[in-house]
Image (spheres, rainbow, N blue to C red):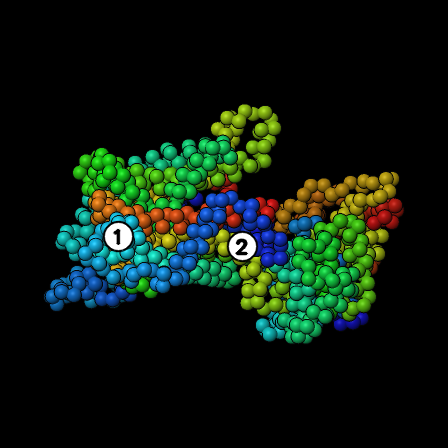
Amino acid sequence: MFGFVLARLLRSLIVLFATVTFVFIVLRLSGDPAQQMLSDIATPEALAAFRTQWGLDRSIAEQYLLYLANAFQGNFGTSFADGREVFTVIGERVPKTLSVTVPAFLLTMLIGIPAGILAAVRRETAADKAVMAGAVVGYSIPNFLLGVALIYLFAVWLRVLPSSGSSTWQHAILPVATLVLAGAATISRFTRSTLIDVLGQPYIAAARADGIPEREIILRHALPNAAIPLVTMLGFGAGGMLGGAVFVETVFAWPGLGSGFVRAVNSGDLNVVQAMILTFTAFMVSINLTVDILYAALNPKIRLGNHDAS
Amino acid sequence: MTQARTPAWSGRRPRLPAFGWPLSIWMCGAWIAAAIAVGATAQWIAPYDHLQQFPLTRLAAPGALPGHVLGTDYLGRDLLSNLLAATQTTLVIALVGSLICAVIGTSLGLLAAHFGGWLDNLIMGLADAMASVPFIVVALGILAFFGSSPLLFMLLVGIANWERYARLTRGLILSANLEGYAEAARIIGVPDRRVYWRHILPNIAGPLIVQLTVNFPEIILLESGLSFLGLGIQPPATSLGLMVADGRNYLATAWWLSALPGLIIVVTTLSISLLGDFLRDRFDARLR
Amino acid sequence: MNPPLLQARGLQKTFRLRSGPLARSVDHVAVDAIDLDLAPRERIGIVGESGSGKSTLGRLLLGLTPPSAGEVRFDGVAHADRRPGDWKAFRRQTSLVQQNPLSALNPQMTIGQQVAEAVWVHRLADRHGARDQAAAMLEKVGLSAELMDRFPHQMSGGQRQRVVIARALVLSPRLVVFDEAVSALDVSVQAQVVAILRSLWQQLDLAYVFITHDLRIVRHLVDRIAVLYLGRVVETGDIRSVYARPRHPYTRALLSSVPSLDPRVRNVAPPVQGDLDPGKAARGCAFRSRCPLAIERCASETPRLRRIDQGHVACHRAEDVRPLPMATAEVA
């Protein structure tokens, strides 16, 4: 167990390291970073100052080490858009993103998992078909479209909720709802198929043959075994929230990481872009690490230390 | 294992009677056929050039003007013509993207399975890394550094999900290599290239095609999403996502400007997903 | 005596097993220090339980797996010295018949295509000629040419195995390894396939290695056998003398556990107790934990193959192994 966690921790660090390296290489490949960062109108003095600050006059190896050091200290220079420290810009946006994604994630699980269980247990009934139909439709509606539809419904037509901004808690309702609807569709579908898989296993048939009541079979036998794949799904769900935030925050003009990322890309604010890439990666790496540890804790094969190579 | 051993798409087996399919599946098929027809002929069947502006009749509702069946947008452009052109763009990009993705992913999976060792580790490590970050983050990064050109954009949607093909192909090839027929062919002296092309590929084509039907709608959504964010298809070209984004400013007065392209996106992806699911279930059932 | 067609010396194969990303790796010796000579047209049986390394040995002989130590020569040329171009010529002269005929055949190709493919990838005929040769070969294994356009799933297990054999023999190879070639078949079908193999051997210039766990079948098919235990040859010799008088306790146990139709001779000797235990094979005799005759010496000293009568046995107590009861020996 300890070795497993250690190995995963090491892998997470390697992923972060690789991402920083990747960004560094892409930045160098895509042209003169000074020119890229400061745009065409920069004065020669500004370019020179920038080059010295980032060590661009030194060798590639030194530049790389310097870049690594800066990156891990959170030093990405200043935003081209408003001249503030990138670290500050990102720092302001993180809580905004968390304030929609975290509630959305919890609600997604609270709705998606029970719906999936219901569909699996009452297979081929109206409840199952309703859940699955909702899931398929939810899966096929991109969340930016869902967002636009919700704006039309609640802000333009019914006029009960604000459509954009983040000044009150009511502003968060539509973004959260968008993320939840899209997320719950995927989660319920996955829960259903996982549970149906488990319910088809021989030990479930054996339990049924022993006359154990169905309720008991679901709670005591099926769910604990389905929990392991479901944990992996938590990771997908959390990743989906972060990816969805890019669209949903843009649709609702919610000033989080996602909309900030899009704005930085649209305005060519590369300092912010690289910091965004690393921030998103760091979030994903921590999510995956958490999932791995949970997975190890739930899985007796790993917990008890005799896991195989897979 | 069973999947790899049993042919999913053997042309010589009796086909299922198609008339037993439910109505919804027929409707999905009809929609897809119509979308393909539009994709192939949009520039000829559109009543106007999609860029032609009629400044005097802006934001006309559907049915309000005899010359414009679906009305006009905020610049007075014919909505129907725009929808046709946008559907074509979206489908062409999704098709090219899907094929690029399938070719890249399958090739890398094949290389990983064939050579193993460090190359396998490298490719699979890359695949893990791709899968661990939402693709939109990678896409935004690439667009930021390299700017958006139609060609780059097509490549970009083409590399989304390549890792799924790579993993799938690698797994299928590894198990096919364990199956006797691939080794048997090698033992009688069939060259590697022919073993892969003639022996293994036909046997693993089924799951790969299923993957294609899963991937295609996702690429439509990715294209629409990026275009919606203003990072994909750039005017004067148009795409469904771009039209949704443009129409967003007129939700209060002309909601159909966003709703109609949105509807096309949803119905198209839904049809492909449903048809894909249905066919897969059918084939799976027959395989058992 | 003829010069050997196939010669293996000190053949060894070690697999490195690793239980997890950070776990220490463990070496598993699948094949250990095996010498083997095979003359043209000679037939040898390799007998052992699953896990004895017999399939690995077959793959080593055909150069499908590189050995960890030792070498294999075919026609005097070592596998290790063969250049890529030479392999093709080698492949033309050798073949392998695999265990599971269903998976050994490509489900997407007709059996005619699969048998003919062997002929024309070696440019021995054009496609038309290859098809004719395939048809002729299929006739030889008792399959009519009308079946050529069938797919594997449209045939019975016995027919499929005959297709596999036809494909292996269509190039008239000089060496074939049969790896459990009939084990997956029903007993009645086994008998048919055995008969076909015997008649084919009469017609062809063919030497083969017949790998099996089934002592009943191998008797009718080979001249010599080698009994494998945990990667080592424990007994080898002429088929008749080994069956008449096994000299290794393991061979004896195997022979006495061959099911007999005669109720009087069932279970006269205890079958082998316990399971294969690769972990304890490091020093001493690997079989000692299951051996009824084991003594202290068996734990301290690894027995080497030594000559007894006409055969070779690796057992310290070979002289003390009792003969099989008469009836059992006859039935086996």
The local secondary structure at tag 1 comes to loop
Q: Mark 2 sits on what residue?
A: B206
Identified by mark 1, the residue type is Leu
Please identify the quarter of the rendering in which residue A293 is found.
Answer: top left
From the top left corner, tell me how far across and down residue C240 is, in percent. Answer: 84, 56
Task: Please say whether residue A234 is visible from this viewpoint.
Answer: no
A60 or C133, which is in the foreground? C133
Say the numbered circle drawn on residue C83.
Answer: none
Query: Mark 2, mark 1: which one is toward the viewer?
Result: 1
* Badge 1: chain ID: B
- Circle 1 residue: B65
Image coordinates of residue B255 in percent, x first then y, are: 26, 46
Q: Earlier in the sequence, mark 2 or mark 1?
A: 1
Amino acid type, label 2: Gly
User: Residue A67 at what x, y percent from top left?
Assistant: 25, 58
**Of helix, strand and loop, which one carries label 2?**
helix
